[in-house]
Image: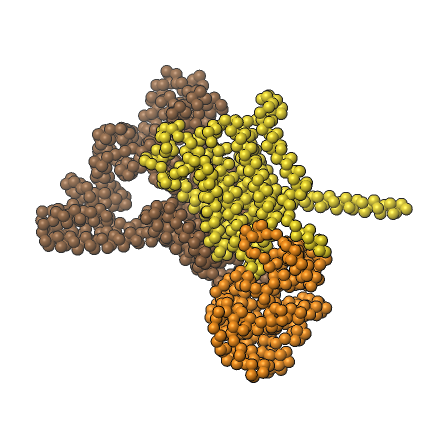
Chain colours: A orange, B brown, C yellow
Amino acid sequence: MRPAMPLPSVLVENATAGLAPEVVGKVRVSDTQLYLDGVSVSFDGFRAINNLALMVAPGELRTIIGPNGAGKTTMMDIITGKTKPDAGEVLFAGRVDLTKLDEVAIANLGIGRKFQKPTVFENLTVFENFELALKSARGAWKTLLGRLNSEALDRIAWALDTVGLDTKVEDIAGSLSHGQKQWLEIGMLLVQDTQLILLDEPVAGMTDAETKQTAELILTLKGERTLVVVEHDMEFVRDLGAKVTVLHEGSVLSEGTVDHVQNDPRVIEVYLGR
Amino acid sequence: MQRYLPLLLVVLMLALVASVRPAGAQDLAATLSGLTDSDPKPAIESLTQSSDDKAKAALAALAAGNLYIRTADNAVVIGEKDGEMIVVTNAATGDIEDMARPEDLQAIAVPEEAKALLAGAAPAASSGPVDFATALAGLKSDSFADKGKAIDALTALGDVRAIPVFRALADGRLFLRKSDGMMVIGAPSGNEIALTSPLDGAALGIAPSSTLDPLFVNNNLRNVLREAVGRLGLGSADPAARRMAANALLDNATPETVALLREAYGRETVDGVKSVMALSLAAAEIAHPDKVKRQEAIAVLGAASDLRVRAMLQARLNQEQDPDVKAALVKAFDRMQTKITLYSYLENFIQGISLGSVLLLAAVGLAITFGVMGVINMAHGEMIMLGAYSAYLTQEIFRAFFPPSWIGAYLIVALPVAFLIAAAVGVAIERGVIRFLYGRPLETMLATWGVSLCLQQAVRSIFGATNKEVANPSWMTGAIDVAGGLAVTWNRVYIIIFCFLVLGLIALILKRTAFGLHMRAVTQNRQMAAVMGIPTARVDAMTFALGSGIAGMAGVALSQIGNVSPNLGTIYIVDSFLVVVFGGVGSLMGTLVGALTLGVVNKILEPVAGAVLGKVVVLVCIILFIQKRPRGLFAAKGRSADA
Amino acid sequence: MRNQLETLAKPRPLLDRKGWAAFLAIGFVLIVLVPLLNILPGRGSALHLSDYLIPLLGKYACYAILALSLDLVWGYAGILSLGHGAFFALGGYAMGMYLMRQIGTRGVYGHPELPDFMVFLNWKELPWYWQGFDSFPFAMLMVLLAPGILALVLGWFAFRSRVTGVYISIVTQAMTFALLLAFFRNDMGFGGNNGLTDFKDILGFPIQAPSTRIGLYVVSVIVLGLCFLLCRFVTQSKLGRVLLAVRDAESRVRFLGYSPTAAKLFAFVLSALLAGIAGALYVPQVGIINPGEFSPANSIEIAIWVAVGGRGTLYGAILGGVVINLVKTWLTGAAPELWLFVLGGLFIASTLLFPKGIVGMVGQWKAWRDQKKAYALDDKAAAQKGAE
């Protein structure tokens, strides 16, 4: 167990926006679900992430916005272990150093990710996609001999119902529409039973009705799971009504409620140009 | 239409070659079958007059009772007993065909009246070099004493043709061909041995060592031989021969040869030869009773870098009494020691660079096509092979249609010809196969492997499976003396220079032309390039043409240092892959560094671990290296690189 | 819905009813009928199966196992190994070493322990790695261990550092090339250029005897059947789905918490074991094993068997392995010059024209036929309607 240590001031400032002053002093790293501090990474001299600090509490729903190239996807890459940061600390549940782990270990800690471009296993059926995502032993031998129990079936049934794919169970995933693939991927995160869910543009390419449904789904998960949602659709972000972090050039530009960040002159400058 | 012009050219040239192919084999077969006629005399006469070595071999076999008719197909064959079986050589083609049981063959008997003719045939066939040939035959004797006599006889003749024979004999490279008992001089050529005739220096093709019996000498004879070479060579008109002769006299000069040497030294006008003679003279005086003379000799010797001189100095060091001379000896010895070590490193290094430049030529085209299109062209090796055959074709056309004095220029013509032929075939592969497979790299690999099989078999069907010899033009033969004892052959030097020229040219094309710009754009981001209006399909085809064309030129270069055979490409393809993987895909710099590193490491490992094991070690190292840097030495880093 | 899920969740059968029927029928023909046709009818009879056909069929069975093993890694896990011939050859060498030790004093030099080539090379005693090969169980263990360990080590290094696609093909090709060079060396102690040959008997049975040949053939066919069922078991399991997922989207699998390295390593090692077994069965039937088996060209040829048969379908791989080798046997006898053209052409055609192989073509033809039938019915219905 990592000893409780005081937070760097920049984080306290970001994290405590909107909190009553008397609780501020009590926030500890060990209380966070996700904790990033001083994270930097550059590709061929280009700084994709620059001294990024971010803290997400357990059960929190956080939305992240930012212009193209702000480093949103790279941040997700760092959290899920796809990219190793050049510097900085990335902690899960206040104590697990994610920079030391690979993607597989991180996924098995309970961190799930939906990609910007829907990536499901196109040659497998919807059911088989769920079967793979289902929380279960991951070893080669275990999967060779693995069987589905009734509890697992309940989970899959529930997820199918939640994402509305119950009529497509035996369809090949490749035959689904774009929106349905997005839903399938979200459904896979549900059966994967992850504590921290990272959603990269979950409503891209969805109709308005589908977007609304997705927002509702995310709101039902809030509290139970920790969610980090990257999205461009401000309408959707407003529907979620959660705390918003604005990234710009690889670091946090502003943090707070939707109204707060929308009125922040720095954010306006970045989005509208100077 | 323009696009198909090169293809048309290829077809035309192939037709041409088919028409000029010699029909000698058929004629010989017809003559040979005449031996079974009731009167074989005309056949024997015709064979005697033939200059063909195979005809001579057949006559020799006939005289020895080794010429047979194979009952299965009535072919005339030369048989040689091997245990209970008989090894059969087709008399008309000279190819070893198979083993046969004695009952499958029927010996060709010679009627009494024809026997006389046969007996007369042997001297008639060698009427020109009669004395030399007779003396030479003495070397076939099993007794060392007889061999010594033969050597003396040959030396006495003063015929410089004896020099290569002596040298080969001393090195164990003088053989009797098992099939016909003919004496041949061998030089290692890959795993096999290239044969030349001791009589006239004519090339007699290439044979595996198992078909040859070496002639042995003892150490005593070896010294005799070396001295004889020296004595013969000093009078030669060829400076290189004089030089070698002087060199041979370095450690076994007799008073008699020293006198000869001194005389030759006075006559000598070529500096390089003169210095070698001076060295050998100094070596003869290392034990001179006069102290000053000894010191002078040591000074001359100390400047050399020859293992034999080093041994000589060491031996003298143990005997020398005079402290001054002893000090000079120690100094000279140390100086030479450092020099020799340095030279051996340098030699390995130069050989490594030479191998590396060959690898570079072979791999650079692969790196370009792999980098731009992300496909592995398994037929790349066959582009090299086609280039080598283009060189062969050009040479044959020069021989057939142009005056002999022009032959030296064929290589210059061969380069563009090879480039065009290989590029045309490359474009055909790209347009016909690869473009349908973009985005499926594994399938591309298999399809191009199929192409490579077809190309190999096509070449084998047209040109035959045997090795073709492409001659070095005179300006590429010989060696330059980099420093004492360290020589680099001209063909290697030219290949190194050529390789860097080609690399420079490619760099220029990539950096300075619109095509190069397009190519680089497509390499980095194909979709984006297409959106920008770059005709990616044309860029692909052109890239393939360039990559294949370079491979073709590499083939011309390879034809200068090895044999040309249908599977020439497969020898280099695995190495080329390794260079590309090691250096990093699509990076010229990576290919350069990768190729030179592999070449040098290979050559440095060779003396330590042996050629094959060295290669295995390199392979294993690369497999391990890919673990650490899966994308090679010079790989791009970043998000786009993961795509 | 729940019922549907329950059905889906059941462990999948190895084969369906029709599949088992076909499997057993083919098994009966190959194991019972073929040997009987060789033994019972007289030589002149039209029904008589010639003696030379038995080891030939046995050879095809070995090729089929080899094709099966490559299909497992290529068709299901997306690893195009161009070095599977190496595993085959290693299994073959292990068997060859056992057979060499069985020769005993019957060799040309009559040495009780050393094989002829060692006596010829002036070796005084058996090298340590030849110890134990006089025991059949030990040799069989080595048939599995030699290729298995090589695959484990190479695969672990390669998959761990995410060497994929054409790179893994090149690495495996380089591996078999390195082994080719190494086994050519006389100092390696595996007979160098000539390899191991002149076998006398296996488990006490004379290796040239017709009855032994039938035995070896039957064993090969049975092993082929078992290997098929084993591969079927793997591909029908959840691991099979994980492998497919790895093949199609390796990085996505990682984010689900599966280690592609482990899954691929499992498939690769299993595949190497099968290839080794194929090699071990092959050697006593052809009577020789030499370094030529390591040549990269051999390994690439296996890929074409699988591609032509239909990759990703186990029976397709078997079909490809047998069909192509049938053509090869016939063509190299009838028109050897043509064979390389045909093989090369097959490589090109199977990738360009029928990427799904024979099996895929049959599937397409069936779909086309069904469609035509459906149209015909529609037309009939329309015609009837028109008549009414």
| Residue B118 visible within the image | yes
Quadrant hosting residue B150: top left
Residue B612 position in % (x across, y down): 38, 45
Residue A37 position in % (x across, y down): 50, 73
Residue B316 position in % (x across, y down): 15, 47
Q: Check the image and name the residue furthest to the bottom.
A: A21
**If the image is split into quadrants, where does the C terminus of chain B sit?**
bottom right
- Depicted B530 relative to depicted C63: above or below: below
Q: Nearer the viewer, residue C165 or C225?
A: C225
Residue B335 position in % (x across, y down): 21, 55
Q: Nearer the viewer, residue C196 or B328?
A: C196
- Depicted A9 relative to depicted B614: above or below: below
Q: Is residue B73 left or right of residue C124?
A: right
- Which residue is depicted at the point 54% across and 67% down? A79
| Residue B531 visible within the image | no
- Depicted C335 relative to depicted B37: above or below: below
Total count of labels? 0
- Which residue is depicted at the point 88% across and 47% down? C386
- Which residue is depicted at the point 42% across and 33% down? C100
Q: Check the image and name the residue furthest to the right.
A: C388
Quadrant hosting residue B34: top left
Q: Nearer the viewer, residue B593 or A36?
A: A36
- Depicted A126 relative to depicted C129: above or below: below
- Which residue is depicted at the point 54% across and 44% down? C69
